[in-house]
Amino acid sequence: MNRPPKRLASAPKEEELDELRLHIKGHKTVKDCLRQYQVKTEMTGDNQYFCEVCNSKQDATRQTIITRMPAVLWVQLLRFEYNMVTYVKEKLKDQVDIEETLDFEAVLKDTRDDDA
């Protein structure tokens, strides 16, 4: 029987960006939400990634990295969260400061520096 390698690598996938949907829970500013959007997520346990090559669930790491911003960007702050116990969307009461101007280049630089 052929066994798949322990770790499968894939090339980064580039996509055009015109909209960001940012989770606000636990964050104080839009800049914090944007940083969290780009944090690595470990996909383990019940949250494992299904590998089509292996035909099984595997531990994986997932990360979105924004490398450049478009001329126009829609930012949606996600103010609702689905409650898995009551099966109802609930409005979050977290207060998020919205800066009058946001230096996206500084946020992107911070994310690239953290990843290095």
Image: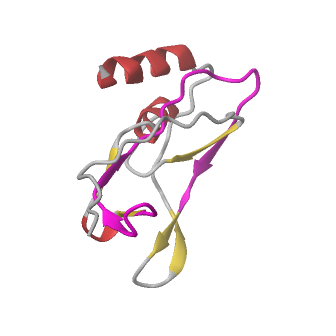
Q: Closer to the camera, 80 or 47?
A: 47
User: In the picture, residue 10 is in which quadrant?
Assistant: top left
Based on the picture, tell me whether residue 56 belongs to the magenta stretch.
Answer: yes
- Residue shown at 37% from the left, 42% from the top: 9
Q: Closer to the camera, 38 or 63?
A: 63
Q: Position of residue 26 (x, y in %)?
A: 37, 48
Based on the picture, tell me whether residue 54 belongs to the magenta stretch.
Answer: yes
Is residue 88 rendered to the left or right of residue 28?
A: right
Q: Is residue 12 above or below residue 93?
A: above
- Residue shown at 43% from the left, 52% from the top: 25
> What residue occupies the far right of the structure in this picture?
72
Q: Position of residue 47 (x, y in %)?
A: 34, 65
Quadrant in which the C terminus appears: top left
The region drawn magenta spans 51-80
Colour scheme: secondary structure
Q: How many marks?
A: 0
- Residue shown at 71% from the left, 31% from the top: 73
- Residue shown at 27% from the left, 48% from the top: 7
Is residue 18 rendered to the left or right of residue 33?
A: right
